[in-house]
Image: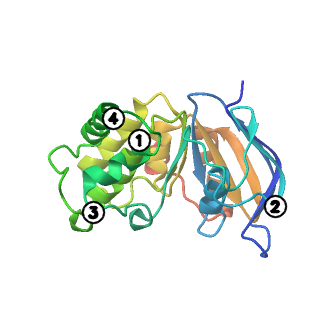
Amino acid sequence: MSLLALHDVGIGWPDGPRVLDGLSLSVAPGERVGLVGPNGAGKSTLFQTLAAILPAQAGQIRFDGAPVQAGRFSPNLAMVFQNADDQLFCPTLAEDVAYGARNLSLPASEVAARTAQALRDCGLTGLEDRPVHKLSGGEKRRACIAGALVMRPAFMLLDEPSAALDLRQRRNLIDLLRGLPQAMIIASHDLDLLLALCPRVLLIDEGRLCADDPAETVLGDAALMVRHGQEVPAALAAR
């Protein structure tokens, strides 16, 4: 059973060349998948297409059995942007995290409960009234994840979630994501994080899907990684 399914998909910006073409894959409920590739390979563009921000230029994308159409957003699919400042816009942290839940027309008590839980899960309790522009880089990153969790989605797209996190925050992030029930695709240059979280890894480069295999098979293939501008993560290189 697939929660997300792509068949022969082409993606790119409107009126521009395709960034990726002929992309076919599926993700099952609860599955965690890593996404790697050099800068410019199309990871963020793919995410924006899956999240219905950009239209697919070819092929078909289905989420939970229904076609994904640009502009028709599903609360069951949440995206965490690579740049936190692209996602945070409310005056205070609590308002920003609560924004998605409020737009689901939930009772105020449910919005408050979900917001408190998301803040607690992301280690942000006590910062509820802090202006978002006064958050540190790591706090902003965790605020973006909390804003996704408050929606209680079935699927999460996380673009460089460990960016700007110190070692303790990164460990907390790994523990948090490992314990979540959601299916997710995690795009990251932090290959050790992907190895810790994702049993499966996709490698994209030069406009195509170059590998889709168990994480250790992809990330541990030195020739493959070098060919596509990557390196074997330290956890595998030490073996």
Which mark, residue 57? 2
Query: How many residues crowd mark 1 within 10 Å: few (<14), some (14–19), many (20+)?
Result: many
How many residues crowd around disc 2 within 10 Å: few (fewer than 14), some, or many (20 or more)?
Answer: many
The N terminus: image quadrant: top right
Circle 3: residue type: Pro
**What is the total number of numbered labels drawn onto the structure image?**
4
Query: Amino acid under label 1?
Result: Ala
For numbered disc 4, what is the local secondary structure? helix
* Residue displayed at 28% across by 37% down: 112
Using the image as rendered, state which of residue 19 and residue 39 is in the foreground.
19
Q: What's the distance in space between the residues labelled 3 and 1, CA to CA? A: 16 Å
Residue sitting at 61 percent across and 28 percent down? Answer: 29
Q: Circle 1 is placed at which residue position?
A: 101
| Badge number at residue 116 | none
Q: Callout 2, which amino acid?
A: Gln
Look at mark 3 in the image and give the residue it sits on.
Answer: 91
Between discs 2 and 1, the one toward the N terminus: 2
Alpha carbon of mark 4 to alpha carbon of mark 1: how far? 8 Å
Few, some or many residues within 10 Å of mark 3 (<14, 14–19, 20+): few
Q: Nearer the viewer, residue 233 or 140?
A: 140
Marks 3 and 4, the one that precedes in the sequence = 3
Q: Which residue is mark 4?
A: 114
**Left or right: where 132 falls relative to 24:** left
The disc, 3 or 2, on the residue closer to the chain's N-terminal end is 2
Q: Is residue 238 visible?
A: no
The first of marks 4 and 1 along the sequence is: 1
Marks 2/1: CA–CA distance = 31 Å
The three-letter code of the residue at mark 4 reads Arg
- Tell me whether the residue at label 4 lies in contact with that at label 1, contact meaning CB atoms closer than 8 angstroms: yes
